[in-house]
Image: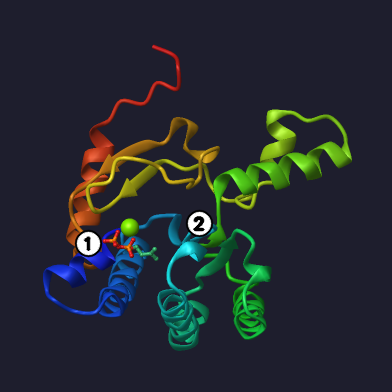
Amino acid sequence: MDGNGRWAKKRHLPRAVGHQRGVEAVRSVSRAARAMGLEALTLYAFSTENWSRPEDEVSALMGLLKHFIQSDLAEFVRDNVRLRILGEWRALAPDLVALIEDALEQTAANTGPALVVALNYGAQDEIARAATKAAAKGAVTIGSIEAELDTAGLPPLDLLIRTSGEVRLSNFLLWQAAYAEMIFTDVLWPDFSPAHLHDALAEFAERERRYGGR
Ligand code: IPE
Ligand code: MG
């Protein structure tokens, strides 16, 4: 989800407003994803590298996250949404950790579409942690690493979308992206709508996936 800052700058608004509008896009796109029957939607909300941003921006992002969980948890419970968090979220502020633990607990029995939030997440860190755990248990294989990744138990990654015109992965789901289709769009995240998601899925459906075969 990239482009919140540029969205705000174009309108001469504070960056925080861009992030607020970004949360609204999260809400509408994740609802649309469920309505379209997607099994899982993963959102890159905060990376291990985002800590290098100014303190006021980091705290604005954390505040928005807190508010998002507080305001939308009842909907996740009601709509059978399986909430999952990727990354080192237990290292976040204690109040946020407690809030996340409660949200996970309240949705633990849900069996529906997964809403996955990558929080304090970096793919290299995820792979290193998974490999360490796999090694402690025995042979390090593709399968044994995969079983320890934060995404264990989630469906394979089919489509990865990056907004705002940047053409790189920025440490997101590096392992899982091995055979994912990718779409890079110039649309800034706050402008990304259910219609954009629909178009991306239509483009995905046209792709021929060969997984190294022919
Ligand atoms: C992405 O928007 C938001 C997060 C990091 C959560 P940016 O803040 O990176 O927006 P740009 O790249 O400055 O436009
Ligand atoms: Mg950015």
Q: Which residue is mark 2?
A: 49
Which dot marks residue 192? 1
Query: Which corner quadrant holds the N terminus?
Result: bottom left
Q: Residue furthest left?
A: 11
The residue sitting at 24% across, 79% down in the picture is 14
Whether residue 179 is situated above or below residue 63 in the rendered picture: above
| CB atoms of marks 2 and 1 within 8 Å | no
Q: Is residue 100 visible?
A: yes
SS at circle 2: loop
| Picture quadrant where residue 7 is located | bottom left
Q: Foreground: 123 or 42?
A: 123
The residue sitting at 47% across, 76% down in the picture is 55
The residue sitting at 74% across, 39% down in the picture is 131
SS at circle 1: loop
Is the residue at mark 1 in contact range of ligand 1, meaning its CB lies under 8 Å from it?
no
96 horizontally vs 31: left or right: right
Residue 49: x and y in percent read: 50, 56
**Distance Cα–Cα, label 2 vs label 1:** 23 Å
Which dot marks residue 64? none
Under mark 1, the amino acid is Phe
Residue 79: x and y in percent read: 45, 76
Nearest to the eye among marks 2 and 1: give it: 2
